[in-house]
Image (cartoon, rainbow, N blue to C red):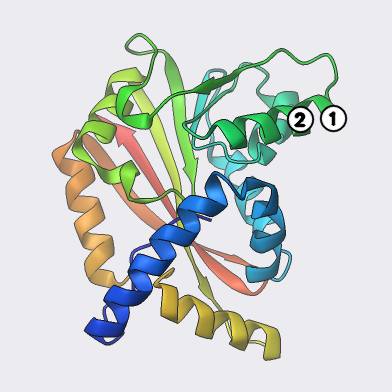
């Protein structure tokens, strides 16, 4: 749950004000208020956030996996059994501490495979990973420098997996409230934004597709991109 692209249908003046507030709020939530992250994510997803994040596992190719923006470490903890060589990278010191706590709670003897760094400067040699994965990342994931780094560290024919966003499906009162919230924050990317993302990935040496995966209350937007 990080800063998102705002809905283009929202009035411009209000959108700009809301965007500034959300950028400030999400930055604090990911750093100084990181201890509240899981609780807020649980609330805004009707308890489904963790399940959405873990759903990417079936799309990963091992054994060497790099997760960008590991956050509280739920995916890293989950992957310890199936992909023990997975590595998590995040620039937030607070999230690093929380993720390490969650991993050690589940696997007390696990080695620390978390790195504090930025995705625009990944501290690994070229062609080290079979898969790079990110779940609900902020816009950094599509910056030119970030995509170049991802392309560099992926092995030949490696795979990039991005759980991009979510679209709430109206089935009950809770999902209607969530849909209203997500329409204000722009959590669901428009067709135009999706095309822009695919174009950006192609320019940086990836063949990408966006798939829609149905989950409880929601439809997930999952990008799978092959390194060319």
Which residue is depicted at the point 72% across and 59% down? 39
Q: Where is residue 187 in the image (x, y as percent from the top left)?
A: 44, 68
Could you tell me which secondary element the residue under label 1 belongs to? helix
Residue at which label 1 appears: 105
> Considering only vertical position in the picture, is 113 above or below 10?
above
Circle count: 2
Q: Can residue 221 be seen in this view?
A: no
Which residue position holds label 2? 101
Q: In this view, does 133 lie to the left or right of 78?
A: left
In the figure, residue 5 lies in which quadrant? bottom left
Residue found at the very far front of the displayed protein: 32
Q: State yes or no: discs 1 and 2 in contact (Cβ < 8 Å).
A: yes
Can you say whether 34 is above or below 122 in the image?
below
How far from the left and from the top, in percent, is residue 127? 35, 13
Please give the name of the residue rendered at 85% of the width and 19% of the height, measured from the top-left corner: 108
Q: Which label belongs to residue 189? A: none
At x 38%, y 25%, the residue is: 158
- Work out how far the residue at label 1 is from the one at label 2, CA to CA, in angstroms: 6 Å
Residue 163 percent location from the top left of the image: 48, 51
- Extreme top residue here? 125
Helix, strand or loop status at disc 2? helix
Mark 2 is surrounded, within 10 Å at the Cα level, by few (under 14), some (14 to 19) or many (20 or more) other residues, namely: some
Q: In which quarter of the image is the C terminus?
A: top left
């Amino acid at each position: 749950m990080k800063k998102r692209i705002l809905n283009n249908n929202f009035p411009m003046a209000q959108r700009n004000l809301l965007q500034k507030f959300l950028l400030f709020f999400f930055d604090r939530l990911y750093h100084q208020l990181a201890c509240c992250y899981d609780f807020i994510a649980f609330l805004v997803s009707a308890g489904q956030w963790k399940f959405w994040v873990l759903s990417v596992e079936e799309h990963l190719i091992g054994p060497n996996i790099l997760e960008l923006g590991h956050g509280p470490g739920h995916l890293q903890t989950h992957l310890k059994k199936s992909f023990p060589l997975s590595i998590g990278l995040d620039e937030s010191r607070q999230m690093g501490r929380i993720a390490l706590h969650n991993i050690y709670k589940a696997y007390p003897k696990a080695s620390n495979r978390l790195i504090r760094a930025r995705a625009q400067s990944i501290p690994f040699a070229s062609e080290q990973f079979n898969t790079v994965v990110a779940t609900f990342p902020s816009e950094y994931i599509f910056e030119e420098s970030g995509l170049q780094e991802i392309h560099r560290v992926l092995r030949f024919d490696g795979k990039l997996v991005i759980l991009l966003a979510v679209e709430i499906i109206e089935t009950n009162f809770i999902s209607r409230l969530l849909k209203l919230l997500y329409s204000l924050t722009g959590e669901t990317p428009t067709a135009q934004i999706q095309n822009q993302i695919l174009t950006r990935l192609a320019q940086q040496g990836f063949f990408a597709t966006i798939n829609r995966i149905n989950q409880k209350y929601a439809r997930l937007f999952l990008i799978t991109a092959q390194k060319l």
